[in-house]
Image (cartoon, rainbow, N blue to C red):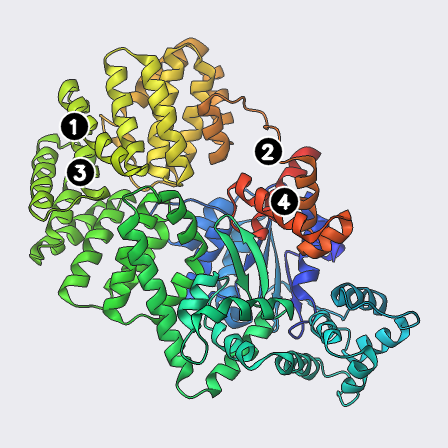
Amino acid sequence: MKRLLGRARLVTLTGPGGVGKTRLALKAAHAVRRAFEDGAFFVDLSDVRAPEMLDRALVTCLRLVDQTARPACEVLHAHLADKRVLLVLDGVEHLVEECEALLGPLLKAAAGLSVLVTSRQVLEADGEHVVVVPPMSAGDAVSLFADRAGDASLGRGQTELVRQLCLRLDLLPLAIELAAVRLRVMCLEEVVIQLLPLDLGNRNTTLRTVIGWSHELCTPHERLLWARLSVFCGSFALEAAEAVCSDSCLPAVEIADVVGGLVDKSILSAEETAGGLRFRMLDSIKDYGAEWLARLDSQSERLERRHKDFYLAQARTSAAAWFGPDQQRIFVRTRAQLDNLRGAFERCEVDEALELASTLWFYWVGCGQLGEGWTWLGRALARGGSTGPRARALWVAGYVAVLIGEFSRAREMLEECRALEDPATKAYAVHRLGCLALVSDDHDRAVELFNEAVEHYAANRTLECNVLMACVELALVMAFQQQVEACHELCDQVRESCESVGELWVRSYVDYVEAYTAWLTGDGDLALTLSLRSLQVSHHFHDLFCTVLVIEFVALLRAESGDVERAAVLQGAAARIWESVGPRLLDSSYFNAAHVACAELSRKALGRHAYAGAHTRGTRLDLDAAVAVAMGAAETRQELPLTPREWEVAELVSLGLSNREAAGRLTISKRTVDTHVEHILAKLGFSTRAQIATWVTEQQDESAR
């Protein structure tokens, strides 16, 4: 595999479910990772059900924050054009045509890109090299069985019997893992006898038979929950399983115990994330559950409806609580729920789709997901819809359009919303038309519209983040017009409202505006303090729009304090970030003022060539590094934030080992490894093990340079 990936740019690992395609792909990616200086990325596509979301899934996995109206495929082309990257696309058999259509042009546009695919079906794409994944070796299979047998220890002299059992299972890793679970209820000899009728060599039959065994081993409640859990996309929390899968036959209070039983039987796997414990099923196991669910009269449709209703309700709850102290928790939870929110969106009726796409406005706007929000809103609005839901989707789409630079589309949508005369949404439409005027330097019109919006909000007795943002944006106009006292007064009112409920996101914009006024009055130290506080929050929430505005402003403050080289580096970093932000606000003479002043000061102090060199270095910084430099860090790599033991655990996670396997390697308890993984996720701000694996590879590559 290592040699093949060295000469072939598109490799497909194919074979039946459970043969170990994913395991081999992860092992191969780890082996060749040093050849890809810009990283190796694992993309689980098994739960991407809408073909049009394929390229968006890749954008998300690559952690690309793009806030433009460009199609996701164009974002991928632009990002990968000069990169040396390995993409591992896992489970693409349901997206074969879409993958072929995406990868062909992408591989041509990005000469340094290589793609490793796992699929039960080959792509039949130009340049594809197909590898039929062989079963495990007999020795590895015996070791895997013994490891999974756990406390059900094998007797002396039983190795040959285990070897025969593994051969009867066609050396399929998943089948071996599931068969090992049966040792909890029968002896090894009985397990082997049960395998005698199997048709050797028919791996699909073998795996299905062993999954069927696991099904038989389950209690009636476990079988029922197994079937019902198949409606979830990706991972899910216990709370979701209780809400979606419970009824009089399976009470919610019993779900936790039943989930525990399914984990014990290896039907579910549990993973610690920043948002708490989450569960998932392998595709082959989920498919088996879905087949059983389909056999239950009307249950499949009912469960899909409950799944959709639950996540629609989750979106409503999160949106309502966004103006409050739980923004961090809502951000983490919504990010973890994204696969299921996508699945729910595909199941929505017209008005429900409009509601879900618009209710998630806080995530699209406040958490750096404008590109995906634009896609959802466009699809929902294209279906029509009733006046109320459509009006709400129009103002949210108009808001997103302003932020991604689609000004003409924004005006069309906001004027259409305004014309609907829907009392609940008129204020929002007027407000965002004010934003259009602001970025167009039409301050008189902006003030008029912001004041009108605030009046409408007050008449509706509305107080939430959008209302306060209207006041912040009005204060920004005042700052640009050097009305310092009026600006301070309005900012103080907004800050008081935010602090009274523990709100953070709007406060980051208040800090930016007040930093600007502090600079106007000559207080550079206060301006820097407020700017850095704003930057910490906006970057934490992935709000790219606020982040780049503040970086531009911090560059000026650094230059004025004499740190002109850092200022030039930050301007280079900002130039790169602006490419991912739709509206080029630097075209505004007011938003551009800090940039122009910084460039003039830095060029004069450094000289043209030195300034250009520092600026170029800045363009090579990623977003995290740019923020670190703005905060005062050096341009060198920072010390790893993990303890030595956490680093050991992270390396084993990157190899694809489970927590139990990692515990065995390190001779510590699984519970200790669970805790280490939880700490790693929290420290790095990640939510999945795949993100840890990617990060480890990046750190190892950087150390090798």
Q: Looking at the image, is mark 2 or mark 3 earlier in the sequence? A: 3
C-alpha span from label 4 to label 3: 43 Å
Q: Is residue 643 visible?
A: yes
Residue 585: image location, x then y, percent: 27, 33
Residue 524: image location, x then y, percent: 33, 13
Determine the residue positioned at 60% across, 70% down. Answer: 261
Q: Quadrant of residue 554?
A: top left
Q: Quadrant of the N terminus?
A: bottom right
Q: Relative to 235, does residue 302 appear above or below in the rendering?
A: below
Q: Crowdedness of circle 3 by 10 Å Cα count: few (<14), some, many (20+)? A: many
C-alpha span from label 2 to label 4: 13 Å
The amino acid beneath tag 3 is Ala
Report which residue position mark 2 lands on: 641
Which numbered tag is attached to residue 490? 1
Which numbered tag is attached to residue 470? 3
Identify the secondary structure beneath mark 2. Answer: loop
Q: Relative to 346, does residue 200 appear above or below in the rendering?
A: below
Identify which residue, 641 or 431, lies in the foreground. Answer: 641
Q: Crowdedness of circle 2 by 10 Å Cα count: few (<14), some, many (20+)? A: few
Task: For marks 2 and 4, give the one nearer the viewer.
Answer: 4
Task: For marks 2 and 3, give the one nearer the viewer.
Answer: 2
Which numbered tag is attached to residue 169? none
Report which residue position mark 4 lands on: 676
The amino acid beneath tag 4 is His
Residue 642: image location, x then y, percent: 62, 36
Identify which residue, 39 or 44, lies in the foreground. Answer: 44
Task: For marks 4 and 1, give the one nearer the viewer.
Answer: 4
Does the CB distance between marks 1 and 3 fall below 8 Å?
no
